[in-house]
Image: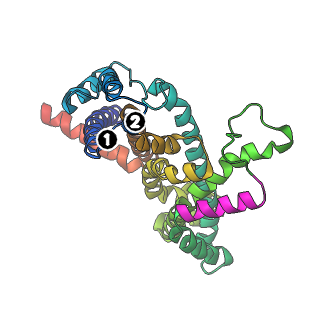
Amino acid sequence: MFLLKLILNRLVQTLMTLLIVTTLTFAMLAAAGGDVLNTLSADPLASAATVQQMRHIYGLDQPLPVRYWRWLEHTVRGDMGESFYYHAPVSRLLFPRLLNTMMLALLALFMAWSVALTLGMMAARRVGSWADRSCEAIILLASSTPRLVLALVVLALASQFSLLNFGSGAALSKAANPVNRSSSWLQIVLPAVVLAVPLMALFLAQVRDGVRQALREDFVMVARAKGLRERDVLFRHALRAALNPLITIFGYSLGGVMSGSVIVETILDWPGLGALSVVAVQSRDVPLMLGIVIITATAVFAGNLLADILLHLNDPRLRQNDQRHRSVQSVATR
């Protein structure tokens, strides 16, 4: 019952936020000046009548509220419109790019979680050990290095050792050279590493400090007094108690990875939503940009909803509070 109510509340919040965000995006793109026909207008071979006719065909001669309302009507019916730049339906352009960005984001999150859980648990058990000192160094370096710098370093190394053929789309080509098959894996692994490094610092600090604090709690001492193995004490009790802030961060990090992929995908030539959004902004492709905004905002809310559900499943205190709240409501209605 609680989960159903949570999902419905989040759905209403998502719809309201999408309406506000798309309205602001539409207005800001219009306020920036110019449109998709700017290049055509500067062409001396294109007459003013031709440009005006094209503007009428695309509906760019209509007032801004009318254009937004028409776009909203079509979007509610499941039609995101047609891209001005690519001359193709926006949905056909978005969903393959969305899958690429999601693969990149999930791989980056998996890398960050794997390193954080492994090294963080070791550091939490042994204060001052090599694992603890390594955590300090990794957290300092990873949190202070911008993704732009990391992407440029990876690009330089990949170009130096001829690891990737940038611009060829080798990661998605089915006709890739069998001799250089490893490049298709590196095409996604290297951007994922760049995205994972800042997350790794955040997750690692939370795992180490959270587990270290949980190991000092009374319930851990009771578990050890009962004769439980140290592995069971560590994973079944200490780690579970330290998971709540990690789950919350996970929900927000999904949106952060997708927004941070703009720089990484553009520099490292990964065909995802980030690289597509750069093209949409540069070409003033309003339907395409609004479609990207919808997909990205929905992914952020989906990540937050997933984090809330995992928190409810992991922490029995939340379920007890929910039961207590329902009991109070039932008594009050009698």
Q: Is residue 157 magenta?
A: yes
Residue 83 vs 277, above or below: the answer is above
Q: Which residues are magenta?
A: 148-163
Q: In which image quadrant can residue 23 be found?
A: top left
Residue 291 visible from this viewpoint: yes
For the residues labelled 1 and 2, the Cα–Cα distance comes to 11 Å
Q: Tell me the SS state at disc 2.
A: loop
Nearer the observer, 7 or 84: 84
The residue at the point 57 percent across, 66 percent down is 225
Q: Is residue 30 magenta?
A: no
Residue 229 visible from this viewpoint: no
Nearer the observer, 100 or 263: 263
Q: Is residue 142 left or right of residue 18?
A: right
Q: Earlier in the sequence, mark 1 or mark 2?
A: 1
Say which amino acid is labelled 1: Gly
The residue at the point 47 percent across, 45 percent down is 278
What residue did someone put label 1 on?
34
What residue did someone put label 2 on?
285
Say which amino acid is labelled 2: Asp
Crowding around mark 1 (Cα neighbors within 10 Å: few <14, some 14 to 19, many 20+) is few
State the image coordinates of residue 97 (x, y, percent, origin top left): 54, 35
Q: Is residue 173 left or right of residue 311?
A: right
Closer to viewer: mark 1 or mark 2: 1
Residue 300 vs 160, above or below: the answer is above
Q: Tell me the SS state at disc 1.
A: loop
The residue at the point 41 percent across, 36 percent down is 44
Q: Residue furthest right?
A: 179
State the image coordinates of residue 210 (x, y, percent, origin top left): 49, 65
Location of the C terminus (image quadrant): top left
